[in-house]
Image (cartoon, helix red, strand yellow):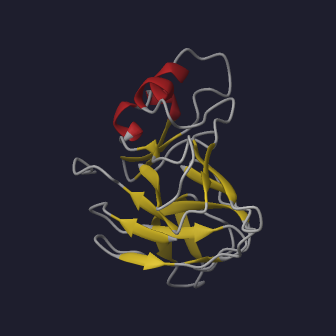
Amino acid sequence: MTLINQCNYTVWPALSNRTGFVLASGENSSVGVPENWQGRIWARTHCTTDSVTGNFSCATGDCNSGNLTCNKEGSAPETVVEFNLDGVNGSEFYYVSLLQGFNVPVIVDPVSGSGGKCESTGCGVDLNAVCPTELKVTRNEEVVGCENPCDGSDSSCEIFETACPQASINPVRPFNCSNPAYYNIVFCPKSTNAR
C-alpha cells in the first residue's frame, strides 16, 4: 500500500496493530501488510510531543499510546479506511468509514485489480467545513474534526450522506477487488484542501 499526503498540512498515518509515522505535505510512503490482513488505516492530525513528559498526542485519531507508533485503534473523530484482505483466495474488501466521525478527506484507489466493485471509494470532501456547530471538534479555535452526526436521530446525518455517498456510515457498504497489485490511500485527494 502507498499512503499519499496531498493535504497542505502534515498528517500522522497509523495502521492498526502495525505502525504509525509522520507524512509531511506532498510526501508518500509505501507500507507492507500481511496478505491476510484485517485492519484500519487513518490519519492523525495536530500531533505534538509534550516538551516536559515526552508524551506524543494528537487532536484527532489519537491512539493513546503516548508514542508516534500505534499499538491500538485511534479515537474519534477520525476518517477510517477498513481492509479485509484474503491473499489466499484473492478477494479483498475495503471501505471508508465515517462511523468514527471525520477528520481528513481520504480515498482508496485499488491498482490493477478486477471485479464489479473494484473501484476508488472514499470521502474526498472536507466535511469539517460543513460540520454542524454542536459536532465540531476544535483546537485553538480551528475546526479539526467532526463527530458522527448519525449516532442519534439527528437529521444532520444527511450532511455526511450527501457529501460522501460512497463512504460507509450505517450500514457498511464494502467494495471488493480481486487480485489488486496494491492500493493507493490518498489523504486530501482534491486540491481545495486549505484549512
Between 83 and 125, the residue placed more toward the observer is: 83
Q: Position of residue 112 (x, y in %)?
A: 47, 62
Question: In this view of the protein, which residue sits in the foreground, 107 or 142?
Answer: 107
Q: Residue at x 48, y 47 (%)?
A: 119
How many numbered marks have been drawn onto this rendered protein structure? 0
Q: Quadrant of residue 124?
A: top left
Determine whether 155 is above or below 7 in the image: above
Above-or-below relation of 1 to 113: below
Relative depth, front residue between 88 and 150: 88
* Drawn side of residue 15 relative to residue 122, left or right: right
Q: Is residue 90 left or right of residue 194?
A: right
* Percent x, y of residue 186: 40, 59
Instruction: Inspect this view and state whether residue 22 appears.
Output: no
> Residue at 66% of width from left, 57% of height from top?
83
State the residue at coordinates (28%, 71%). 26
- Whether residue 113 is visible, yes or no, is yes
Q: Where is residue 6 drawn, in percent x and y?
A: 31, 62
Q: Residue at x 45, y 33 (%)?
A: 164
